[in-house]
Amino acid sequence: MNTVVRASLAVALKQRGGCNCCQAVLLALADETALSGEDLKPIGAGFCAGMGTTQATCGALLGAGMIAGLKTKGENTLKYSRRLFDEFERLSGATLCKDLKETVNGAPRCSCDECVKNAIFAYGKVFNGEE
């Protein structure tokens, strides 16, 4: 599945309800791991509006980082996580939920749907070289 299709899937999962931003990213990238979506979904349950609604690091970015850890089996994961962080920040303009939701010209800097897409796009670039 290419990145554009994954990004659309993640947004659809988020919009249908039943998935927070982190869970939507986890489920859209599930086939990159040995775990099923059913196994991954509860792992992302606490990462809504920044971990535990603290408005800290975006849950979508955290979900991509979790998949990176599973994909790399912990080998050099910090390097990949940093690259995900940098690419997500470049695409979204921030990494903290509170900053992403900050109103700029009457709209959030980056909506949840855009954050979910950007996490998938960042993952695609870091792991597959996709732009």
Image: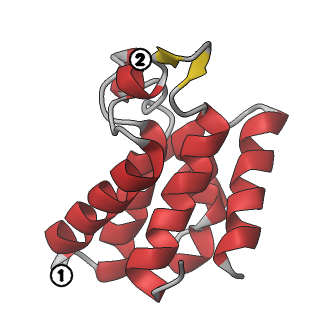
The label shown at residue 4 is none
The quarter of the rendered structure image containing the N terminus is bottom right
Identify residue type, mark 2. Answer: Thr
Asked which secondary structure carries label 2, the reply is helix
Residue that extends furthest to the front in the rendered view of this protein: 105
Residue at the spot x=69%, y=53% of the render?
10
Residue that extends furthest to the bottom in the rendered view of this protein: 128
Asked which secondary structure carries label 1, the reply is loop
Callout 1 crowding tier (Cα within 10 Å): few <14, some 14–19, many ≥20: few
The label shown at residue 75 is 1
Residue at the spot x=26%, y=67% of the render?
83
Identify residue for label 2: 53
Measured as percent of width and height from the top left, residue 45 is found at 51, 34
Relative side of 107 to 40, left or right? right
Q: Alpha carbon of mark 1 to alpha carbon of mark 2: how far?
A: 30 Å
Q: Earlier in the sequence, mark 1 or mark 2?
A: 2
Q: Is residue 2 above or below residue 66?
A: below
Q: Nearer the viewer, residue 100 or 50?
A: 100
Relative side of 55 to 48, left or right? left
Residue 67, quarter of picture? bottom left
Measured as percent of width and height from the top left, residue 27 is found at 63, 58
Q: Is residue 5 above or below residue 97?
A: below
Residue 76, quarter of picture? bottom left
Relative side of 58 to 112, left or right? left
Identify residue type, mark 1. Answer: Glu
Measured as percent of width and height from the top left, residue 65 is found at 35, 58
Measured as percent of width and height from the top left, residue 50 is found at 38, 27
